[in-house]
């Protein structure tokens, strides 16, 4: 965790703390000592590679943003969400998850739920016929978006590929970033050179 954090910190941007890295002793203190802004995501934990996000139909992590459960699992999660005072940001997902269809996303917007819009997940919904263009336009204008996540995929699976100039939704991500909204680059940075990492950030921050 510490090695990955320190590598990304060199880019001078905030860091989303996500599951997957091997724990480092006193990693929480390591992060606290840095000046890098962070956001915790989904099943992240400071002392574990990954933790269960949902347990007994309730969110079991302290992350700012989480994936809703798989469709058909933790069926009481929405009731928990509606009655709790400290609600996590819910991420727009892809088919197979709650919030994985346009109809579910529209219902979430009608209920005023604060969302993290993962553009690559929207692309999967669009390519798989689960979200209409009308819903995508409505989502872009929704006024309760707390985060935007962006990466590329081929429309079949959430592969977190690097961005290209033609990546679906990139112009909108740039617009949100220019407005000061949190935009999270979720491509697999550990596979890229330092130069390519910088190029990825530049794709988001440059003018459309």
Image (cartoon, rainbow, N blue to C red):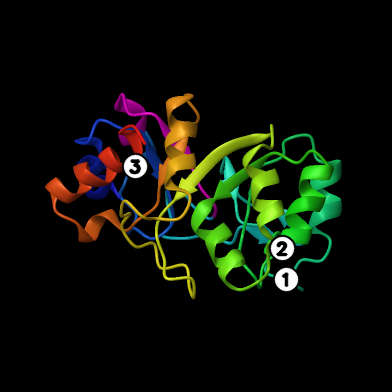
- Indicate yes or no whether the magenta region holds residue 73: no
**Residue 116 at x, y = what percent?**
59, 44
For residue 131, side relative to residue 23 (left or right):
right
The tag earlier along the polypeptide, 3 or 1, is 3
The tag earlier along the polypeptide, 2 or 3, is 3
Return the residue nearer the eye: 149 or 43: 149
Span highlighted in magenta in the image: 30-42
Residue 57 in view here:
no
Return the residue nearer the eye: 188 or 1: 188
Return the residue nearer the eye: 18 or 148: 148
Residue 55 in view here:
yes
Q: Are marks 3 and 1 in contact (CB under 8 Å)?
A: no
For residue 176, side relative to residue 95 (left or right):
left
Q: Relative to 177, say whether 1 is above or below.
A: below
* Residue at position x 37%, y 36% in the image: 208
Q: CA distance from mark 2 to mark 3?
A: 32 Å
Where does label 1 land, which residue? 71
Q: CA distance from mark 3 to mark 1?
A: 33 Å
Q: Are marks 2 and 1 in contact (CB under 8 Å)?
A: yes
The tag earlier along the polypeptide, 2 or 1, is 1
Where does label 2 land, which residue? 98
**Residue 153 at x, y = what percent?**
41, 66
**Residue 51 at x, y = what percent?**
53, 59
């Amino acid at each position: 965790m510490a090695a990955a954090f320190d590598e990304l910190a060199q880019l001078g941007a905030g860091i989303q703390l996500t599951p997957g890295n091997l724990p480092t002793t006193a990693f929480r203190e390591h992060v606290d000592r840095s000046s890098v802004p962070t956001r915790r995501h989904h099943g992240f934990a400071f002392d574990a590679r990954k933790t269960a996000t949902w347990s007994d139909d309730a969110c079991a992590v302290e992350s700012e943003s989480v994936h809703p459960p798989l469709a058909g699992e933790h069926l009481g999660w929405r009731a928990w969400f509606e009655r709790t005072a400290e609600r996590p940001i819910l991420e727009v997902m892809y088919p197979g998850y709650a919030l994985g269809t346009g109809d579910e996303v529209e219902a979430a917007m009608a209920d005023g739920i604060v969302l993290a819009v993962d553009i690559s997940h929207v692309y999967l919904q669009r390519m798989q016929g689960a979200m209409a263009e009308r819903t995508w336009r409505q989502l872009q204008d929704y006024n309760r978006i707390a985060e935007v996540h962006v990466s590329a995929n081929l429309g079949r699976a959430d592969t977190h590929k690097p961005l290209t100039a033609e990546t679906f939704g990139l112009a909108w991500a740039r617009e949100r970033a220019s407005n000061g909204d949190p935009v999270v680059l979720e491509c697999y940075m550990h596979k890229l050179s330092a130069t390519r990492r910088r190029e990825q950030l530049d794709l988001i921050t440059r003018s459309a």
